[in-house]
Image (cartoon, rainbow, N blue to C red):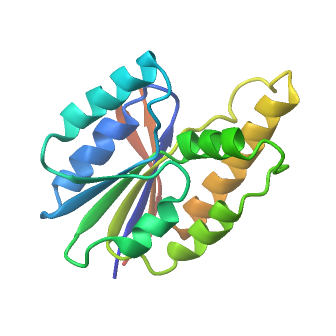
């Protein structure tokens, strides 16, 4: 049975680093599904940093809009895939579909793909709902979509880990 681990937490809490360390405990071959797009110099630096962290340990797939499609197309010999990150993906969807009103067919297609994952999955996301209520509609919409998607993924996950200052706290652990 394939295991889904969801890693959530605040910005710069160590989520991606921890996801890679978990994935490296599983025998290769490994995949990395990146949702980030190189839209400016700061993002290019972040992407380059993440590429260096992965080194050659992972086969990379870059998919900013439809990571569920990549899950379906992963080579059958992949043992584990890290999907980083759901909230960056939501930002991409909101940018590309500004009039979608919080409903995205890409998300609707992604969630069923988690019912029978092709390999062990480690899914990284941000917890964005613990702060103040955002002042504008766009930010509130982003927070709401992220919160809803995180809840759906957490319900399907075997394990949910909350990162705090680089330390993992297990929130959910399902016996297999």
Q: Residue at x 36, y 32 (%)?
A: 14
User: Height in image: 107 above or below 7?
Assistant: below
Q: Residue at x 31, y 60 (%)?
A: 81
Residues 71 and 95: in front is 95
Residue 38: horizontal and vertical position, in percent? 44, 31
Q: Position of residue 106 (x, y in %)?
A: 63, 62
* Residue 42 visible: yes
Q: Nearer the viewer, residue 103 or 40?
A: 40
Q: Left or right? Give the position of 74 relative to 36.
A: left
Q: Residue at x 68, y 43 (%)?
A: 96
Quarter-of-image position of residue 108: bottom right
Q: Position of residue 164 (x, y in %)?
A: 44, 31
Picture quarter containing residue 17? top left
Measured along the vertical axis of the image, is residue 5 above or below residue 134? below
Q: Which residue corresponds to the image point at 60% horizontal and 42% vertical from the top-left?
A: 92
Residue lying at the far top in this picture: please name it: 41
Q: Does residue 175 appear in this view?
A: no
In the rendered image, the quadrant that contains the C terminus is: bottom left
């Amino acid at each position: 049975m394939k295991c889904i681990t969801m890693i959530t937490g605040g910005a710069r809490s160590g989520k991606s680093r921890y996801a890679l360390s978990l994935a490296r405990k599983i025998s290769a071959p490994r995949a990395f599904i990146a949702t980030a797009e190189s839209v400016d110099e700061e993002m290019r630096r972040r992407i380059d940093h993440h590429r260096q962290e992965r080194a050659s340990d992972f086969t990379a797939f870059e998919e900013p809009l439809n990571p569920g499609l990549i899950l379906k197309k992963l080579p059958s010999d992949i043992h584990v895939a890290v999907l980083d990150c759901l909230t960056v993906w939501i930002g991409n969807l909101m940018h590309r579909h500004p009039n979608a009103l919080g409903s995205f067919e890409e998300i609707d297609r992604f969630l069923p793909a988690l019912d029978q994952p092709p390999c062990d999955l480690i899914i990284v996301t941000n917890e964005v709902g613990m702060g103040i209520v955002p002042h504008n509609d766009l930010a509130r919409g982003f927070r709401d979509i992220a919160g809803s998607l995180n809840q759906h993924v957490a319900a399907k996950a075997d394990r949910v880990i909350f990162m705090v200052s680089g330390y993992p706290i297990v929130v959910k652990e399902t016996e297999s």
